[in-house]
Image (cartoon, rainbow, N blue to C red):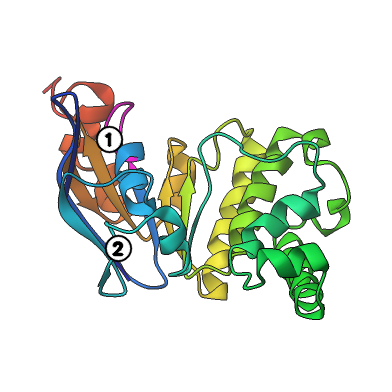
């Protein structure tokens, strides 16, 4: 479904990402990990469209998308969450989630101003989609609360619901467990695994190793902007290069 081919990005002569490639198969939960400064967020932003690669390609369902703006990529049923919660705190939970579904709206600005019948039908459909997304993440009863009044862990779930309201085929999760306690992280892992049953393919960037290892089918590890390992969680857990990147010493340093 997703092909990343030799992408690279530099900032002022610093190579943030260099020649990174991997493939995410449809129906997979794919983890992208690495120490701080490894290039994970830069890679993620090149896939989602916030950054354009200096070299390489990003393809979705065989179509090249790395030159498309983020809203154009959303039209390919690609949705993402962000490392830092980005909700409208004064709006209701439902209204926040509806903004995701609005990206699929077709009504004109004039139709919205005049409240034409077609616009009202579309708004009702978007509201139904948003409520379904809230049910999917277990927040249906909180739909009318102000988003800013929710606990941080629940705000994270609202962000996931907003992304699901786009009805994505590919869901990009950017450190969704950041700031969550152990119980919230475990619940998030259960939710992520269940989303695959809905036909959603997931690319996950995360620091919480227990979460990544528990939900991922395959993992790529970056360090200093380069891919140093790829494999199953079991393979990654035992890879000497990965151990050295995280601990700073080879696995057999004491031998």
Tell me which corner region of the image, top left, top right, bottom left or bottom right, holds residue 240. top left
59 w.r.t. 227: above or below: below
Disc 1 target residue? 39
Q: Is residue 34 left or right of residue 214?
A: left
Mark 2, secondary structure of its residue: loop
- Residue at (61% x, 49% y) in the render: 188
Which residue range is magenta in the image?
33-40
Q: Is residue 145 left or right of residue 39?
A: right
Of residues 78 and 199, the one nearer the viewer is 78
Of residues 63 and 203, the one nearer the viewer is 63
At which x and y percent is residue 215?
47, 55
175 w.r.t. 251: above or below: below
Of residues 203 and 50, the one nearer the viewer is 50
Q: Earlier in the sequence, mark 1 or mark 2?
A: 1
Mark 1, secondary structure of its residue: loop
* Image mark count: 2
At which x and y percent is residue 120?
81, 73
26 w.r.t. 97: above or below: below
Disc 2 target residue? 65
Tell me which corner region of the image, top left, top right, bottom left or bottom right, holds residue 249. top left
Q: Is residue 135 left or right of residue 174?
A: right
Q: Is residue 223 left or right of residue 135?
A: left
Q: Residues within 10 Å of mark 1 (few under 14, many from 20)?
A: many
Residue 58 part of the magenta-drawn span: no
- Residue at (30% x, 36% y) in the render: 34
- Residue at (75% x, 65% y) in the render: 112
């Amino acid at each position: 479904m997703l092909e990343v081919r030799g992408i690279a990005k530099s900032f002022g002569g610093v190579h943030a990402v260099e020649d990174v490639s991997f493939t995410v198969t449809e129906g997979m939960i794919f983890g992208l990990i690495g120490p701080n400064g490894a290039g994970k967020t830069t890679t993620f932003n090149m896939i989602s469209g916030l950054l354009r690669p200096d070299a390489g390609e990003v393809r979705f369902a065989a179509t090249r998308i790395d030159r498309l703006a983020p809203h154009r990529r959303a039209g390919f049923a690609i949705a993402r969450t962000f490392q830092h919660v980005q909700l409208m705190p004064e709006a209701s939970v439902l209204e926040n989630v509806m903004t995701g579904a609005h990206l699929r709206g077709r009504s004109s600005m004039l139709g919205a101003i005049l409240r034409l019948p077609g616009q009202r039908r579309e708004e009702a459909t978007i509201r139904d989609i948003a409520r379904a997304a809230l049910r999917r993440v277990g927040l249906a009863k909180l739909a009318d609360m102000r988003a800013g009044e929710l606990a941080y862990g629940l705000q994270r779930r609202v962000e996931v619901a907003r992304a699901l309201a786009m009805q994505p085929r590919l869901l990009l999760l950017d450190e969704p467990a950041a700031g969550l306690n152990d119980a919230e992280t475990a619940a998030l892992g259960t939710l992520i695994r269940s989303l695959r049953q809905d036909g959603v393919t997931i690319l996950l960037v995360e620091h919480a190793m227990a979460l990544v290892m528990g939900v991922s089918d395959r993992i790529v590890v970056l360090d200093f902007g380069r891919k140093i390992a790829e494999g199953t969680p079991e393979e990654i857990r035992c890879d000497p290069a990965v151990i050295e990147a995280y601990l700073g010493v080879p696995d057999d340093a004491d031998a």
